[in-house]
Amino acid sequence: MRTSPLDATKQSNNNNAPSRRQLIHGIVTGAILSSSLLLPKVAQAAQTPLERLVRVEEIGNGLDLTSPPPLSSSEVFYPTSMTNTNWQVQRVLTSVEGDVGQAGLAWKLLGGSSDELAFTSKLTEVYEEQYIAAPEEMKDAFYKHDLDQDGKLLQAAISDRGCELSSRTGLEKDAVQWNTKGSNSIDYTRDKDGAVTLTVVQRKIEPPSDTGFGSDEVYRIQASAGGIFAGTNVDRAARVRRRYRRGFDEATGKRILDCIEIVTTHRVLDGIAGMEFPTSTCKSRLRLTQL
């Protein structure tokens, strides 16, 4: 029996077509390879300065979290009149844009209240802050007031960051380690989050003046990856910008500070944070009243 050219073509195509077993094998192999790309890297070989430079250039406006440049200021400086004073803070979240999950996680790791309704329902957080004299080793903790014609240098105050995080999270003061020398970091442990390290890797400040003052800081957040990788720490990046304006409460006459805070989260790849395009943006309004 003769086979027509059309029948021969069909038979050839059937012979070349993958079997059901081959199709299943291909799908499973592809899934394994794809999932392996999502696994966090536990260890990496040391890289040369040239390799590190290439890594930074590959991410738009990248910031190397693992070996950042020296900070331009040893701390965020506040007016000298705030030295040794206590303030009540009323904080309320006003808007969230972008990836709400990342925004909420950064909000909590940076010291957000244990009551998550403060984020999900935008309830007002109330806690206390203390301001102390800048230590002697902070040689740059001086500023000139723009209304002082004599140009006298004033010693700045700084925020007791350990006290702030303790008051905001409800943790004991001993559970929060504020490292002011060299590392500019805070270590704390909260039951659900595990051990967390917050390190300032970039800082710009606006010194106190008659119009106000402010700061712009980038944090490297080292904390658990969560989920099935809870035992592995990962790097996250958050940028915190604050602008303060001084005033007086008309009802009580007490000094107040009004602050606008903007927190953005950023993608991190191999220790490099892409600062050009944030993945989320949180805006908050703070009112500080002197006690």
Image (cartoon, grey):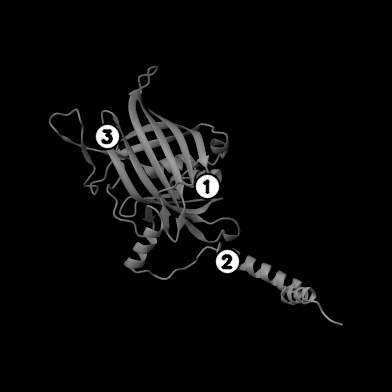
Task: Determine crowd level at label 1: few under 14, some 14-19, many 20+ residues with C-alpha closer than 10 A.
Answer: some
Task: Determine crowd level at label 2: few under 14, some 14-19, many 20+ residues with C-alpha closer than 10 A.
Answer: few
Residue at screen point 39% across, 62% down:
55
The image quadrant of residue 154 is top left
Could you say whether the residue bearing mark 3 is in a helix, strand or loop? strand
* Of residues 241 and 135, the one drawn nearer to the viewer in this rendering: 241
* Of residues 104 and 196, the one drawn nearer to the viewer in this rendering: 104
Could you say whether the residue bearing mark 1 is in a helix, strand or loop? helix
- On-image quarter of the C terminus: top left
Position of 285 relative to 234 (above/below) = above
Residue at screen point 44% across, 41% down:
263
The residue identified by callout 1 is: 102
The residue identified by callout 3 is: 208
Q: Give yes or no for contact between labels 3 and 1 (Cβ–Cβ under 8 Å).
A: no
In the image, is 105 to the left or to the right of 159?
A: right
The image quadrant of residue 34 is bottom right
Q: What amino acid is found at the position of numbered circle 1 in the picture?
A: Gln
Residue 99 in view here: yes
Q: What amino acid is found at the position of numbered circle 3 in the picture?
A: Pro
